[in-house]
Image: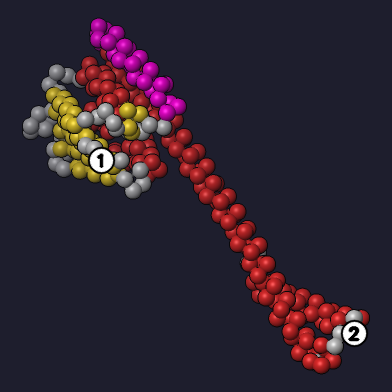
Amino acid sequence: YRKKFVLYIASFCSLILFTGGLKVYFYNFVLHGSDVASEGILFTHLYWFFRDLFEVSAISSIKLASDWVITAGKLTQKEKNELEAEFRFLKAQVNPHFIFNTLNNIYFLINKNSSKAGEAILSLSNLLRYRIYERSESESIIENEIQCIKELIGLEKLRNDENLKVEFNVKGNFMHHKIEPLLFIPFVENAFKHCGVSKSGKWISINFELTASEVRFHCSNSKLSFYSTSDNVHSGIGIKNVRSRLQLLYPQNHQLLINDVEETYSVELTIKD
């Protein structure tokens, strides 16, 4: 276990040679066995050496194999515990990040003395109720996620100007789909945050396509032609969080594509069941 293989083999063989000599002496001079006299001391010694070598090697192999299985199990459990701890940390990050953005929206409305602030507080209440309810669950019904996004869109539209056009569509049957809570929220927040006026106007498009085997989410927004959102996307806590959670939860069953062109920024996330 200390990786001193040469010393181990030398000690192992020396010990067997020594015990073999003791056996020859004990068998010949104490028990007065006839094998030593007829076969010779050297041959008898070699016989005991190889016999003991085989037996001890076999027993040692069983011991090493047993220890390897136990060690492998401990390492697997350790890796699992580390992944679970990392996932719990990532999941916990969603709450403050999401709440901070929403409270900023409400603060903006209050400063404007807008009557819509009450509606915003009610929407926030619904979002927090959903978040608290889903905290202990590893998966959420996709319908709840869609409703959560609708609440968020309502909040964001309250603080944005009327020129912003928001399109939200859901295609397919979402009754049987379950998904990790709040995976799509950071992309929607990002769309509102970086949305700008392009030649085609100021717009955001959010679409869900649900089939029997996968959930496809597409979110795109207009932006100023000279403004690049790539650095902001990769440095933001929310997007990094989603990337890490996707790697932990759906390592082989997801595809995340981000496309940043002159006047459009888009995200497409596909998760397979």
Side of 22 where 72 appears, left or right:
left
The picture places residue 224, in percent across and down from the top left corner, at 15, 35
SS of the residue under disc 2: loop
Q: Image point 62% across, 59% down: which residue?
A: 66
Q: Image point 79% across, 80% down: which residue?
A: 20
Q: Which numbered tag is attached to residue 191?
A: none
Taking the magenta stretch, the answer to whether it contains residue 120 is: yes
Q: Give the range drawn in magenta.
A: 110-137
Taking the magenta stretch, the answer to whether it contains residue 263 is: no
Mark 1 nearby-residue class (10 Å; few <14, some 14–19, many ≥20): few
| Quadrant location of the C terminus in the rendered image | top left
Q: Which amino acid does label 2 sit on?
A: His
Residue 142 appears anywhere in the view: yes
* Viewer-nearest of discs 1 and 2: 2
| Quadrant location of the N terminus in the rendered image | bottom right
Q: Which amino acid does label 1 sit on?
A: Ser
The picture places residue 110, in percent across and down from the top left corner, at 30, 10
Q: Distance between the residues labelled 1 and 2?
A: 80 Å
Residue 93 appears anywhere in the view: no
Name the residue tied to disc 2.
32
Q: Image point 43% across, 35% down: which residue?
A: 90
Side of 206 where 179 appears, left or right:
right
The mark tally for this picture is 2
Side of 238 where 43 appears, left or right:
right
Name the residue tied to disc 1.
213
